Amino acid sequence: MTTAYKNRIQEFKVALSEENINLKTLRELCFSGIPFEGGIRALCWKILLNYLPLDQTLWESFLKKQREVYTQFLREMIIQPGIAKANMGLSREDVTMEDHPLNPNPDSRWNNYFKDNEILLQIDKDVRRLYPDMAFFQRPTQYPCQLILDPQNDYETLRRRVEQTTLKSQTVNRNRSGVTNVSSPGKSLNLYPSNEYEVLPSGSEAHWEVVERILFIYAKLNPGIAYVQGMNEVVGPIYYTFATDPNSQWKEHAEADTFFCFTNLMSENRDNFIKSLDDSQCGITYKMESVYSMLRERDLELYLKLEEQNIKPQYFTFRWLTLLLSQEFLLPDVIRIWDTLFSDQDRFHLLILVCCAMLILIRDSLLAGDFTVNMRLLQDYPISDVNTILIKAKDLRDTS
């Protein structure tokens, strides 16, 4: 560790030791990257994402309250419905004229259960393939949720719900004549391919299961948006940062803290996921066009080349902007970009600058390439040094 880096860590420690944290000072420090050592990054993200109050004297009571709130969410949205489902249908009284599995009434508990299952299956599919090049999300967490795993709680877990629903959808299929074929679940039904669905011992749960729970709770609490594919890519780096915190007192509560930080980030980013807002000024179309508007101002030649080749911003910036570049770089580089994004008061304007910088940095290749070559460049971005990109984005901001 170099002397300069040690000094930098010390600067962070000083800034974070203030009883009332100076947000301006902290933002300036974080803009150039946050050290991992001592849990500094995880702590800074909690402050920058407006989770922790600036007054440190409030932290203990605030965190206790938030974590209790999250525990209550688990009880109300996973355990209690799971108990109800485990009991549903055990007696004839559960299937009544008023409420039964085919009841079209939107308030029917069966109807809500089936709707939730649709969302859960999509979440499940997405979180299982989160960062497949890393083993982290498949590994067991050091701090499994005891409330969820408590054998005293006889209820249908999310894992069981997925297994049951997958089983039903795979064993009941309609052929083209409209005849329903029911195959035996025992017949070579591979619900869980070994590489993707490794079964952990009783009392353990994988990190992806924790992420699944966070997203399911979020979907239940935000029915207007629920779950949209891609949210898993936004929550993943936050959870990874908190779940690898070297400070075990923080790491133990990674699930609850991730949930609230993700919720705060989504409150700023959610419009990108709402299809009905796509063409409004707060929607994703406007933001994608903003990247090209900025490029036109900064590099007219490159802008005209992309226009001439009919390379629309939505062909590549949709993913860049909605997923905060989480699919374009390796996870450590995504985390480094997010240090800078989170530190900026106007983080989503900075993201547009970063996207513009990414285009300008490969201008020579884009000017020389045809449509096919350029689309490949933009969908598999060639520069891996994110510091170069961030420096260029800062230059664009400072010269605007």
Image (cartoon, grey):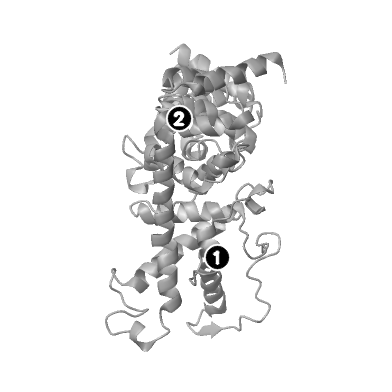
The residue furthest bottom is 92
Residue 290 circle label: none
Callout 2 secondary element = helix
**Residue depicted at 40% across the width and 68% down the height:** 81
Instruction: Look at mark 2 in the image and give the residue it sits on.
Output: 48
The residue furthest right is 1
Q: Quadrant of the C terminus?
A: top left
Counting every numbered tag in the picture gives 2
- Asked if residue 374 can be seen in this view, the reply is no
Q: Depth check: 249 or 202 in front?
A: 249
* Residue 156, placed above or below residue 386: below
* Residue 168, placed above or below residue 290: below
Name the spot of residue 247 as percent of width and height, x first. 60, 37
29 vs 9, left or right, is left
Q: Quadrant of residue 348?
A: top left
Instruction: Look at mark 1 in the image and give the residue it sits on.
Output: 159
Name the spot of residue 320 as percent of width and height, x first. 52, 36
What's the distance in space between the residues labelled 2 and 1, CA to CA? Answer: 33 Å
Name the spot of residue 175 as percent of width and height, x first. 53, 80
* Residue 178, placed above or below residue 235: below
Q: Label 2 is placed on what type of residue? A: Leu
Name the spot of residue 185 as percent of width and height, x first. 61, 80
Which of the marked residues, 2 or 1, is nearer the chain's N terminus? Answer: 2
Q: Residues within 10 Å of mark 1 (few under 14, many from 20)?
A: few
**Residue depicted at 48% across the width and 61% down the height:** 120
Q: Depth check: 36 or 188 in front?
A: 36
Q: Quadrant of the N terminus?
A: top right
Q: Label 1 is placed on what type of residue? A: Arg
